[in-house]
Amino acid sequence: MKNTLFVLFTVFCLMACKSKSENTPSENEEALTTDRQAIKKIDMHAHFQYPRTYLPEFFDSWNMQATLVDVAHEDSTSIRRSWDKYLAHAQTAPEDFFLCTSLIGVGIDDPDFATEAIAQLRSEIASGAQMVKVWKNFGMVTKDASGNFIQIDDPRLQPIWDDLKAQGIPVMGHIAEPEQAWRPLDPNNPHYGYYKNNPQYHAYNHPEIPSYETIIAARDHWIENNPELPILCAHIGSMSHDVDMVATRLDKYPNMQVELAARFGDLARQDSRKVRTFFDTYQDRIMFGSDFGNGRPESEMTPAEIADEKEDLMESYDTLWRYLSSTDSLVVRGQKTEGLGLPAPILRKVYHDNAAKFLELN
């Protein structure tokens, strides 16, 4: 009888241990979800052009808002913008979105260029834009009447910066590309796919495009010339391959901040301890951004496509969260790395507080 009781007790203990072991992953997952939900977030660099039925609940589950960033593209025939789409989307869910309009340098030789640009920006600011973006057209695409590439520190643009300063409107600057754009294609580089599919921006094959160093120097000169203009350098200031380069500029330019969109792969290539120290040192001047978005109306998509899009978006945001918040071994943009394990106070700043202060939401 004693033996029987002992066997039954042993089996019960083993089953209890097995049950506890099986529950541990879900409990850990629930804790991670709770921590993620507890930290408010602003994705400072998003491109959701069109509404999605799932997006309000999705954003709520992440405790997140996003800045919809317009981009002015110049090609051989026209200038293309998506401002009207972003504005319409933001108006459907104003609690979820902020707006960023854009500026392009086409027509800079016209005596009325600055006046007309200021009028356009003021109109779009009145419609809800809280920030203005300048893109890599400056330095890499747009030329003036003399055939020179227009750099971002061109004096003809100064009246625009002065007006934005007077209005208290910050600027997001995506100036230059990652250094890889001026190098031969490298299949191991996180930007390989982009330049393979967008050869027009692969400067290595376009010797007419100014050098990386020339464009970065013009960007630095622009920041230095406008110390009262809050400037958010998109994509880690196009210096994401080397956090020391970024640190040098942050030390030199008090009005400069950076956001992380689409450059997590570059961070993942660097030593995690060094990157962690960078975040610790500049925790008040780094903002979360993803570059995630959509480009098709929901009405043109099948239910399966919408489900796949939602799943991909969840996995993509989750990967970035794990990179910043955990010390897991993971793969980011094809790069094997270890998560940074940032503490909650820094995560709150990077994910929300720095952006809220920059946009003057407090």
Image (cartoon, helix red, strand yellow):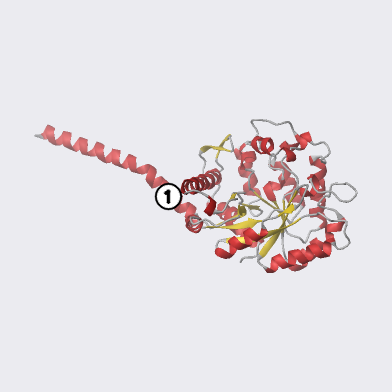
Q: Which residue lies furthest to the right in this view?
A: 146
Instruction: Work out which residue is located at the far left of the displayed protein and give it.
Output: 1
Residue 55 placement (x, y as % from top left): 51, 56
SS label for mark 1: helix
Residue 214 is left or right of residue 357, and the answer is right
* In-front residue for pair 314/350: 314
Report how many numbered discs are placed on residues in the image.
1
Q: Mark 1 points at which residue?
A: 31
Q: What quarter of the picture does the C terminus occupy?
A: bottom right
Q: Where is residue 264 in the image (x, y as percent from the top left)?
A: 61, 42
- Category of crowding for the residue at label 1, using alpha-carbon neighbours closer than 10 angstroms: few (below 14), some (14–19), many (at least 20): few
Residue type for callout 1: Ala
Task: Give percent across and percent down for residue 47.
Answer: 62, 53
Pick the front one: 310 or 214: 310
Q: Which residue is drawn at 83% across and 58% down?
A: 157
> Residue at position x 84%, y 47% from top?
149
| Residue 129 relative to residue 309: left or right | right
262 relative to 55 in the view: left or right: right
Residue at 50 percent across and 59 percent down: it is 56
Quadrant for the N terminus, please. top left
Q: Is residue 108 above or below residue 209?
A: below
Nearer to us in this view, 271 or 99: 99
Q: Where is residue 324 in the image (x, y as percent from the top left)?
A: 56, 46
Residue 7, located in which quarter of the rendered image? top left
Residue 224 visible in the picture: yes
Any part of residue 93 in sight: no
Q: Pick the residue in front: 116 or 246.
A: 116
